[in-house]
Image (spheres, rainbow, N blue to C red):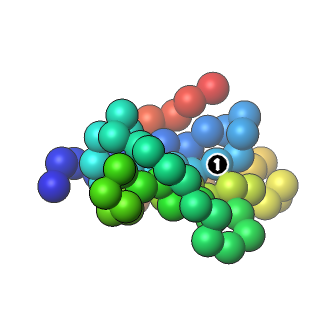
Amino acid sequence: MEKVRVYYDRTGNTLTVWFDDPAKEHVCDEIEDDVVLMKDPRGRVIGFERLNYLSKKQQKVRANMPVEVQMLD
């Protein structure tokens, strides 16, 4: 497995986690409200996205995350 990539998009308020190369994404399935699985052509889950990740209150307070993240603005 490659390194796990974690992206927080402040503008879109989404948290995206990739377990494999995002270029391999073939299809996305919304498995429940605000949770999307990204799959490769063989149907293996290679990532997920959490929509509406932070509440309005949490967005105002930038908590420290215990992982290295890349911020997208």
Position of the N terminus, as image quadrant, is bottom left
What residue occupies the far top of the structure in this picture?
73
Q: Residue at x 74, y 50 (%)?
A: 59
Q: How many numbered dots are placed on residues in this image?
A: 1
The answer to which quarter of the image holds residue 46 is bottom left
Residue 16 vs residue 58: left or right?
left
Q: Residue at x 28, y 48 (%)?
A: 20
Q: Which residue is mark 1?
A: 14
Position of the C terminus, as image quadrant, is top right
What residue occupies the far bottom of the structure in this picture?
32
Q: Secondary structure at mark 1?
A: strand
Q: Position of residue 28 (x, y in %)?
A: 55, 53
What residue occupies the far right of the structure in this picture?
56
Residue 38 vs residue 73: left or right?
left
Mark 1: which amino acid? Thr
The answer to which quarter of the image holds residue 8 is top right
- Residue 33 appears anywhere in the view: yes
**Circle 1 residues within 10 Å: few <14, some 14–19, many ≥20:** some
- Residue 58 appears anywhere in the view: no
Q: Residue at x 83, y 55 (%)?
A: 56
In the rendered view, would you say 69 is above or below 47?
Answer: above
Residue in front for this viewpoint, 62 or 13: 13
Q: Residue at x 35, y 50 (%)?
A: 41
Residue in front for this viewpoint, 9 or 47: 47
Q: Position of residue 69 (x, y in %)?
A: 42, 43
What residue occupies the far front of the structure in this picture?
42
Residue in front for this viewpoint, 62 or 35: 35
In the rendered view, would you say 2 is above or below 23?
Answer: below
Q: Position of residue 54 (x, y in %)?
A: 71, 58
